[in-house]
Image: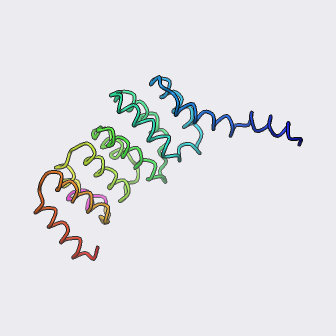
Amino acid sequence: MSSVGRLLHNAFSPASQSASSVSALFRESNLESLVQRFKKLCEHQKYRGKVDIYEHTVRHLASAGRFDLVEEVIEDQRKYICVSKEGFAARLIRLCGKSGMFDHAQKVFDEMPIKGVLSFNALMGACVNSNKFDEVNRLFKELPEKLSIKPDRISYNTVIKAFCEMGSFDSASLMLDEMEKKGM
């Protein structure tokens, strides 16, 4: 193929068009158009793995106070949650939490077909990011047994952070002692 042929092929290939779509997404200032561009990109599986696209879109919408559009984005993404992809659902939970939308994070978590420590930690992180600090301790006490999971360092650190944010330093210290007893 000639160099001109390669240039034309590259300019009109799906990969090139998708790359320009990502650039357009990052430049988009109209929030409704941003949501539509985001949804269109996410039709392609390779873009559903790109955390920065999700972070940018949700952060931009949340900072504008357009939680209705954040909800629209999250709801649209739920159709892509695959039984074997706990990480994808955990990302949606974290995004809800970063937007201060804990109820939505809880809803995504509750409807997940498979729940493990990754989604558990995402839900607790969503509590912290949504300033629902007292909820973190409740989840930490109830969910591991219910889900048959073992909390990890991230789980404990999230609870400790919540206790510190609430000013419950004695409780945070007790949690540190518990971690030490468990060899963490």
- Where is residue 31, by image quadrant? top left
Q: Is residue 68 magenta?
A: no
Of 4 and 144, the residue lying toward us = 4
Q: Is residue 143 magenta?
A: yes
* Residue 127 image point, x, y percent: 25, 47
- Where is residue 7, by image quadrant? top right
Q: Which residues are magenta?
A: 141-147
**Badge count:** 0
The secondary structure that dominates the magenta segment is helix
Give the vertical position of 120 relative to 92 (above or below). Answer: below
* Residue 90 image point, x, y percent: 40, 50
- Relative to 165, is 2 on the left or the right? right
* Residue 45 image point, x, y percent: 58, 43
- Tell me the quarter of the image containing the C terminus: bottom left
Identify which residue is drawn at 35% across, 40% down. 96
- Where is residue 3, by image quadrant? top right
Identify which residue is drawn at 48% across, 46% down. 51
Of 64 and 121, the residue lying toward us = 64
Of 11 and 151, the residue lying toward us = 11
Give the vertical position of 182 relative to 91 (above or below). Answer: below
Identify which residue is drawn at 33% across, 42% down. 98
Identify which residue is drawn at 89% across, 43% down. 1
